[in-house]
Image (spheres, grey):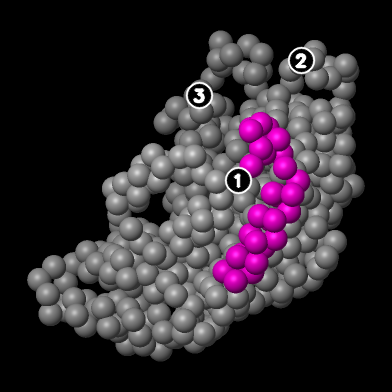
Amino acid sequence: MSNNIFEQAFSAEDFRKQGHALIDMLADYLSDTNSNKQEQGLAIPWQAPEKQLDYWQQDFARRPLHDPLALFKETMARSVKVHHRRYLGHQTLPTLPLSVLSTAVTTMLNQGMGVYEMGMVGNTLEKVLTEHLAGVLGFGAEASGFITSGGSLGNLTALLAARAVATGIWSKGYKDQPQPAVLISEEMHYCIDRSVRMMGFGSEGIIKVPVNERFQLRTELLEEYYQQALADGKQVIAVVGCAGTTSTGSYDDLEAIAAFCQQHQLWFHIDGAHGAPAAFSPQYKHLVKGIEKADSVVVDFHKMMLTPSLSTAVIFKRGSDAYRTFSQRAQYLWSEQDSEEWYNGGKRSFECTKAMTSLNVYTIFRTYGDEIFKENIERLYGLAKIFADLICNNKNLELAYEPEANIVCFRHKTEKDSSRFNAAIRQQLLEEGHFYIVQTILNGELYLRVSLMNPLTSEKELKDLLEEVEKKAADLMKKDI
Ligand SMILES: Cc1ncc(COP(=O)(O)O)c(C=O)c1O
């Protein structure tokens, strides 16, 4: 080993050796977890936070580390297995092995992205990708976008553009400004509520419109809520629709919201983080009918488009709107401060330094084409329907709604307190680790929630899950809970 810490840290030979060993280890992980064999192991090696902390505090005290492979192995052993066929939890996908390779390239290159010179390839790929995606969603040639880190940041960015178009708050602040407000559905992801508060609108600025029994925004109420806002002296700057809600994967009636926004000259933003990629499938694209009428749309590549976290497209119907969001000067980055340059990423994105995640998305498109996204949607949405049928055909179970996407909520029937009973089932599943599912609250009651994210999960794993739920329920029936 060299005495010079930097010679060792940048050693190409160490990297080659460790890299080959790591690829072997990851390939073993892949074949072990993503198989239908019994020896697949646990979907989640659950450990309470204090125990986990204790392990890592002790590990940290054992510095310095000479071989990172043991550390990586331990990290893998202690983590939830998103490639496991019984991983049925949150909307996190099993990454393609191809993406592990593209991520290695982006990490080695470490491009900057805020300014063209520091991200020549990455900024260009963002343009190519977001324009292609805009075309799939049905937008015209004027549309364009960029990539940012996550749906939460993407939604904030789009709403800031809506605010910039409707008000002068960006430069004047809130002086002489009527209370700004946004109309959203009760089922919106919390990041929308958070974005509106971060923009300084406060609670008064969030107008929640109720949803129907399928958890879709009740568009027939929009006019009433809008008129009430005006009567209260508010300035509504936007309506947010959802293409795939978080809890239930429900799609709002985008056509109806678009018509309402057009009638009142309001910005129409769609949170399509989860469900907008339905546009890739001829079978499911009806779910996003009207999406091309939105002023802005957010799509997470890292939810239904097989890309590792985080990578989100923010698409604007009129590409020039994107430059209004952060109209600002940064002398050290851009020589032309006020012009619209797609290739200087920092002009439109909140981020200055940003990972070149566009390469991950681009590599998948170039290798497998649009076909893989179509297949992914059709397989997972189709599997959700099969799962819903299994639930409906079981007299002990109750389906919360007919799923439109790949998110299914259900519960076990009981004479006991239903929420506590089903929470206890889910807690037992978590602690045993053979299946990973989550829970959500619908109409004030707790439901078990399954997101089908792995295209290799089959009906068998879903039948096994229901059997396990029934076993847990039978045990709990005998207990006092
Ligand atoms: C509908 C929807 N919007 C936005 C988000 C937030 O996206 P991110 O986790 O990429 O910030 C989520 C996350 O689950 C979501 O389901």
Label annotation for residue 151: 1
Label annotation for residue 52: none
User: Is 390 above or below relative to 97?
Assistant: below
Q: If you read the primary sequence from the N terminus, does the residue marked by circle 2 or circle 1 appear first?
A: 1
State how far apart marks 1 and 3 are (Cα): 20 Å
357 or 344, which is in the foreground? 357
> CB of mark 2 within 8 Å of CB of mark 1?
no
The amino acid beneath tag 1 is Gly
> CB of mark 2 within 8 Å of CB of mark 3?
no
How many tags in the picture?
3
235 or 444, which is in the foreground? 444
Q: Is residue 368 left or right of residue 419?
A: right
For the point 82% across and 51% down, the residue is 129
Secondary structure under badge 1? helix
Q: Name the residue under label 3.
A: 200
State how far apart marks 2 and 1 are (Cα): 26 Å
State how far apart marks 2 and 3 are (Cα): 23 Å
Q: Name the residue under label 2.
A: 329
Badge 3: residue crowd in 10 Å (few <14, some 14–19, many ≥20)? some
Q: Position of residue 98 (x, y in %)?
A: 73, 63
